[in-house]
Amino acid sequence: MSVEVDLSGVSGETAAAAKLHLLPCEVEHTGPAQVTRFFTPGVRDSGQGALQASFRGRELRGENVALPDGYTGLVLKEKHKAVSDEEARVFHAAQKFQEFTYWNMETPPSKNDGLQKALHWLEITKAIHSPVDKNISQNGSHTRVKVEDSSP
């Protein structure tokens, strides 16, 4: 099965961070949602970048997450689902973004969350695939490369 992404629907502008939320739940609804009317006014900043809110009576803890330099996020919509493995799946890009608000149930987001690990992996792959500096120290037949964690 092939996958196609149609980028013709996105402009050069990106969405504001407050408009994109990644919630730790599945909402069975298709169509627009009035997020700003029901969710955003309840977001409280507890200081140091930590956010608090509640969704259907459950406590949420969150933070704003920026995508690494050189990456752009896309909001994709599939207008027609493929009915067989031979039919291509076509996704239409509706919006671009550089940052979003990431939420966990009851615990603050941490670098051990799957999403944070995936974003950190982008930095690791950049280091792995970048040219090797000739000034790196060599010990015997092994080359040592120091990779530093830049997360707080």
Image (cartoon, rainbow, N blue to C red):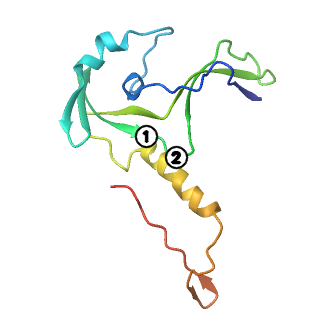
Q: Amino acid at mark 1?
A: Ala
| Mark linked to residue 66 | 1
**Residue at the location (58% across, 81% down)?**
135
Q: Residue at x 77, y 24 (%)?
A: 85
Q: Position of residue 73 (x, y in %)?
A: 54, 33
The foreground one among 10 and 85 is: 10
In the rendered image, is residue 107 in sight? no
Q: Determine the residue positioned at 38% across, 55% down.
A: 151
Q: Which quadrant of the structure image shows residue 34?
A: top left
Q: Is residue 5 visible?
A: yes
Apparent side of residue 104 relative to residue 97 in the rendered image (left or right):
left
Looking at the rendered structure, the secondary structure element under dot 2 is loop
Q: Is residue 58 left or right of residue 148?
A: left
Quadrant of res 140: bottom right
Q: Is residue 112 above or below residue 18?
A: below
- Residue located 36% across and 14% down the image: 35
Name the residue type under label 2. Answer: Asp
Q: How many numbered discs, if any?
A: 2
Task: Classify the position of the C terminus by image quarter.
Answer: bottom left
Where is 137 relative to 115, above or below?
A: below
Image side of residue 95 versus residue 132, left or right = left
Q: Secondary structure at mark 1?
A: strand
According to the picture, the residue beneath numbered tag 2 turns out to be 69
